[in-house]
Amino acid sequence: MDKVLAFSKKILKEVIDKNSIVVDATCGNGNDTLFLAQSAAKKVYAFDIQQQAIDSTLKLLQTNNCLEKCEVILDSHSNFDNYISEPIKAVVFNLGYLPNADHTITTLADTTLLAIDKFLTNLEINGRIVIVVYWGHENGKIEKNKYVEVFGYKDGVSKIKLGEKFYFVKSKNIENVSKDKNFKVIKGILLVNTEYGLPSDFDPKFDKFVEKQFELMKIDANREKITLDLYKAYISYDEQKELHKNAPKSDRNVNYALYATAGHNESQIGQSIDIIGKDEATNLKEEFKDTEEFKWLIKNAHKYGFILRYPENQEDKTNFRFEPWHFRYVGVENANKILKNKLTLEEFLRLND
C-alpha cells in the first residue's frame, strides 16, 4: 500500500504548479491534504463527511504550519462544486474507511462516481485525478468491482468513460473495443487533422471549461474595448459532412479546416472556437488578421490557454489553410510554450520529427 500511495503522490506532483487549484476528495487523517499543502499548489480544498476526519486534518495542517492555503470542508466530495468555482488541476481520492474510526462508515461508489464525473467537467487540460481504492473490507470489494466496471482493465488496456460512451486506452492512443474508432492523443492533447480523425458517433459537445476560459478572455478583451464573439464552438459529425459536401472550390491544394472531411475538423472535439469581431466584412475571412481583435488575440490568447491553430504560411505543417479566426484550447502551460517557440501544434507534438 505504501508503494501505491508513493506512486499516487509522484504522479500528482508532476502536474501541480504555483497556479494550481487542487483537491483532496477524502481527507481522512489529513496525510494527502498535507502533501498537497506542501506542494507548489496555490490553493488546497479538502473534503470529508466525518467531523473526526476534519479535526484530524486541521490539526495536522496546523502542526506543520500549512493552514494558510487550505480550506477543509465537512461535506461530501460530490458537492465540491458548491465550494469551488476555479478550474481544478489535480484531485486525489483515497477510498475506504477512516482508520481508527467507525469502519461501517465508508466511501460509496455512487457518490464517488458522481463526483468524478463533475471533477472531469471542471478539470484543466493536462490535469489529473488519482483514485486509490482500499478494498480489504466488504464494501471495499463492492466499490472496487463498481470502479472496474466503469474504469476497468482488459487485455492490457484501461477502460475510460467519456460522456455515456466507453473507450479503451493503450499507449497514447484511445480506441474502442471493436478497434474501428481510433483517437490520437499526445501529451494529453486530442489531435485531429487530415491524418487523424474522429468516429461518427463522437459527440462531446462544447467543453464547459473551454467555454469558461473564452468567457473570461472575452470579458478581459472588452475592458480594453475589444469585442470578441463566439461564432462556432462545436460542429457535429453530420454538420461537418454537410460543410464538406458544400465546400466552395479552392484555388489551392490546401483547403480550410472548416471544410475538412467529416471527422477531420477539430471543431468536432468541442475544444476549439471560431471567433468573430465587430466588422462583419472580415469575419471568417483571412482579412480578419488585419483587425484589432486578431491583434489582441495574438498578444493575449495564450494567457487563457488558446493558440492560433492554423497560422499563416504553415500549411506544410498543419495541412490546412490559414484561419485567423480559429483558436484551439491546449492549456495555459502548453499555449505559452507554443507561443514562445513559435510552433504549430503539430510541431509542438513533434509529429514532424
Image: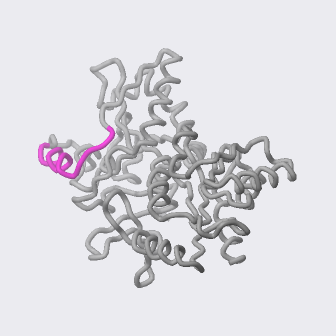
Residue 160 position (above or below residue 210): below
Decide which of 289, 265 is in the foreground and name it.
Answer: 265
Q: Main secondary structure of the magenta part?
A: helix
Question: By what rule are the colours in the image chosen?
Answer: one colour
Q: Is residue 288 left or right of residue 241?
A: right
Rendered residue at 74%/42% (across/down) = 69
Residue 300 position (above or below residue 14): above
Outermost residue to the bottom: 155
Q: Which residues are magenta?
A: 233-246
Residue 22 position (above or below residue 182): above
241 falls in the magenta region: yes
Q: Is residue 1 left or right of residue 177?
A: right
Can see residue 244?
yes
Q: Quadrant of residue 180?
A: bottom left
Q: Is residue 114 left or right of residue 247?
A: right
Residue 314 spot, x, y in % from top left: 41, 47
79 falls in the magenta region: no
Decide which of 1, 188 is in the foreground and name it.
Answer: 1
Outermost residue to the top: 225
Residue 13 spot, x, y in % from top left: 69, 60
Q: How many marks?
A: 0
Residue 123 spot, x, y in % from top left: 51, 50
Decide which of 31, 345 is in the foreground and name it.
Answer: 31
Rendered residue at 31%/59% (across/down) = 164
Decide which of 163, 301 is in the foreground and name it.
Answer: 163
Can see residue 311?
no
Q: Is residue 48 left or right of residue 222?
A: right
Residue 88 spot, x, y in % from top left: 57, 47
Quadrant location of the N terminus in the rendered image: bottom right
Rendered residue at 48%/19% (across/down) = 222
